Image (tube, helix red, strand yellow):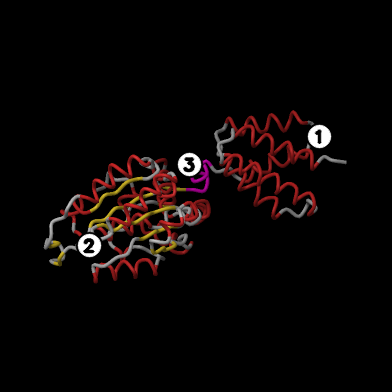
Amino acid sequence: MSNLPWVEKYRPKKLDDIVHQTNAISMLKEVIKTKNMPHLIFHGPPGTGKTSAINALAHELFGKENISERVLELNASDDRGITVVREKIKAYTRISISKNKINNETNEPLPPWKLVVLDEADMMTEDAQSALRRIIEIYSNVTRFILICNYIHKISDPIYSRCSCYRFQGIPLNIKKEKLLYICNNENINISDDALTKIIETTQGDLRRAVSVLQLCSCIDSKITVESVLDISGLPDNDIILKIVDSCKVKDFKILEKTIQDIIEDGFDVSYIFKALNEYFVMCQDINDSIKYQILMELSRHDFRLHNGATKYIQLMSFASSVHSLLNQA
């Protein structure tokens, strides 16, 4: 158990362990009581408990020894084509299930249906979703489907209309702090308040990522500081952001070019740099609103290109060049 990654070691095992998702958990507890469940879509940001909630539901419904027979789990980002839907999912839904079986852990009868879980269902192709819709229609009497996704708008309307949707919210800061402190106490980790705050801030509502960052930091030193958090997570500190801004203010373009090259060579994640630059320019009082508006528009365009696969160096250099022109214009 001690060799497990902390994400798995401290993953919620029961529905009662899932935090801050009251509506979804109340519904799932009712499913366990009644053995009746609609098709479901769980959507929301990563690290909020979607997969953990379904794993807990499956174990409480079927018991450990029946999971392999009653649950098919696929990651739709890997198995997202129409062939997988037609072969794996359709074949599984056609298999008959043993009736009158008992969950030995609860001594209650098993539900008269199987469960198909599609993680990252928003990555499925349109053809695959069309095929899935038909399978949902035909095999609903013996199979229930749960789709997990981060972006609900990527699920087709015909599937959406056949499912009950539950939104998983980002984990609040106080709950994340409580969970991380619990892990630190269990693992004998000494962490400063500033370092804990930095982990919580940088991972936003993603509790899973916060636990991963915490474990990575602990591998370096049992005493975790802000510096180790920034180093592990690849986040730029304030000095890096100020260095970029100061270089943009200098008329000599070669200074800016050298600064950007150094930052890229140091391995910083440009998406985090853009996020930090956004916060800087929004709060900056030394730049007039007209220039600030143009800078933020440029930032949004370059960030969009970056997330669509554009080269990190080119996007950061291009954005910095635009800021350089705006700040040095006559």
Indicate which disc, 2 or 3, sits on the residue closer to the N terminus. Answer: 2
For the residue marked with disc 1, what is the amino acid?
Answer: Lys
Q: For mark 3, what is the residue?
A: 232
Q: For mark 1, what is the residue?
A: 251
Task: Give 39 or 9, whichever is nearer the viewer.
Answer: 39
- Report the magenta residues as a range: 225-234
Where is 156 relative to 312, above or below?
Answer: below
Q: Quadrant of residue 79?
A: top left
Question: Where's residue 166, x and y in %?
Answer: 41, 63
Q: Determine if the magenta segment contains residue 228.
A: yes
Indicate which disc, 2 or 1, sits on the residue closer to the N terminus. Answer: 2
SS for callout 2? helix
Give the prevailing secondary structure in the magenta stretch.
Answer: helix
Q: CA distance from mark 2 to mark 3?
A: 39 Å
- Give the number of the disc on residue 61: 2
SS for callout 1? loop
For the residue marked with disc 2, what is the amino acid?
Answer: Leu
Label 2 CA crowd tier, 10 Å (few <14, some 14–19, many 20+): many
Which mark lies nearer to you, 3 or 1?
A: 1
Indicate which disc, 3 or 1, sits on the residue closer to the N terminus. Answer: 3
Question: Where's residue 153, x and y in %?
Answer: 50, 54
Q: CA distance from mark 2 to mark 1?
A: 67 Å
SS for callout 3? helix
Question: On the rendered image, what quadrant is the C terminus found in?
Answer: top right
For the residue marked with disc 3, what is the amino acid?
Answer: Ile
Label 1 CA crowd tier, 10 Å (few <14, some 14–19, many 20+): some
- Contact between marks 3 and 1 (CB within 8 A): the answer is no
Q: CA distance from mark 3 to mark 1?
A: 34 Å
Horizontal arrangement in the rendering, residue 16 relative to residue 130 (left or right): left
